[in-house]
């Protein structure tokens, strides 16, 4: 059995050698950083792919109703494309032509009958001289297409006008009989605004401004629909509150017209 005094003691760890004079200390071991680990194993560092986000519009107040686009409200055809600037060439031609006519009539004081007469004189003179020139140089005269309005187009236009006129007459009859007080107030307000606008400018300028508005308001609303609906919802809520107060205090005391006759079953 060994003597405990003779047992060897574990030697301490060796100390690093001191650097020589004028020398540099040996570099310490550098642990790998997170960036290098990410470069070494991109699969582990890459976050899991998230599902595509779908933009959902708030279901608040909508001027055009739920799930109704501006293009659909405008008819969804070529006219809607022109009003929404999807057919930019046609839109530019319409606005440019309207601007030229407004300048001719308002700025240059041209008259409609004079303009139509001068345009017809120029067109007929050019076509007549063209036909004679072709005959003089012994070439076949130009074949101008036959332009005429089809019966179907005339019937469709007449039906559309008939429906609009009948709808307007029905509205006036309902108001005259006192059936709908809200419609009465709305029509009176609209006619008053129209009279004020008509006193500020003439009819041609009003038509020109209306053409510019129908080519700018739909595309602006289509672009900022959420913001416009938000403010329109607030305005609609306030208008309903004021109307309820007015109906409770004043309009409820006014006698209404005869009730609508019920349909006999």
Image: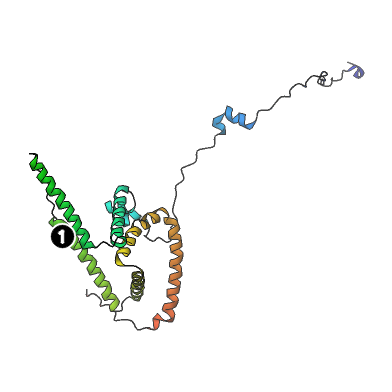
Question: Image height check: is 53 above or below 197?
Answer: above
Answer yes or no: is residue 39 visible: yes
**Figure check: 53 above or below 247:** above
Residue 114: % across, % down: 21, 61
Q: Please, is residue 140 above or below residue 198 in the view?
A: above
Q: Let me know if residue 81 appears in the view.
A: no
The crowd level at tag 1 (other Cα within 10 Å; few <14, some 14-19, many 20+) is: few
Quarter of the image that includes the N terminus: top right
The image quarter in which residue 263 lies = bottom left
Q: Residue furthest right?
A: 5
In this rendering, position of residue 182 left or right of residue 10: left
The quadrant where residue 227 appears = bottom left
Left or right of 245? Residue 139 is: left
Q: Position of residue 195 (x, y in %)?
A: 34, 72
- Residue ID at (30%, 47%): 89
Residue that label 1 marks: 155
Q: Quadrant of residue 229?
A: bottom left
Q: How many numbered badges does the structure rendering display? A: 1
Which coloring applies here? Answer: rainbow
Task: Classify mark 1: helix, strand or loop.
Answer: helix
Q: Is residue 133 left or right of residue 39?
A: left
Where in the figure is residue 231, as x and y percent of width and height? 46, 62
Image coordinates of residue 139 in percent, x first then y, are 9, 39
In the image, residue 43 sits, relative to residue 130, either above or below, namely: above
**In what quadrant of the picture does the C terminus appear?**
bottom left
Please name whichever residue, 71 or 58, is drawn nearer the observer in this view of the structure: 71
Task: Tell which of 80 and 181 is nearer to you.
Answer: 80
């Amino acid at each position: 059995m060994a003597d405990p005094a003779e047992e060897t003691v574990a030697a301490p760890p060796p100390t690093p050698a001191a650097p020589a004079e004028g020398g540099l200390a040996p570099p310490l071991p550098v642990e790998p950083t997170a960036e290098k680990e990410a470069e070494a194993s991109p699969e582990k560092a890459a976050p899991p792919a998230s599902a595509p986000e779908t933009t959902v519009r708030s279901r608040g107040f909508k001027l055009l109703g739920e799930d109704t686009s501006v293009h659909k409200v405008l008819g969804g055809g070529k006219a809607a494309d022109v009003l929404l600037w999807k057919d930019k060439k046609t839109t530019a031609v319409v606005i440019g032509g309207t601007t030229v006519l407004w300048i001719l009539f308002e700025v240059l004081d041209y008259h409609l009958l004079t303009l139509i007469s001068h345009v017809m004189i120029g067109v007929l003179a050019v076509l007549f001289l063209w036909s004679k020139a072709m005959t003089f140089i012994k070439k076949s005269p130009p074949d101008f297409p036959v332009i005429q309005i089809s019966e179907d187009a005339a019937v469709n236009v007449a039906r559309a006008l008939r429906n609009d006129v009948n709808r307007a007459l029905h509205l006036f009859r309902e108001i005259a009989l006192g059936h709908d007080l809200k419609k009465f107030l709305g029509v009176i307000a609209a006619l008053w605004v129209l009279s004020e606008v008509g006193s500020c400018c003439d009819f041609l300028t009003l038509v020109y401004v209306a053409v510019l508005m129908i080519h700018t308001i739909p595309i602006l609303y289509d672009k900022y629909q959420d913001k416009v609906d938000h403010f329109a919802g607030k305005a609609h809520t306030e208008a309903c509150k004021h109307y309820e107060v007015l109906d409770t205090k004043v309009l409820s005391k006014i006698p209404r017209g005869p009730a609508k006759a019920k349909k006999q079953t």
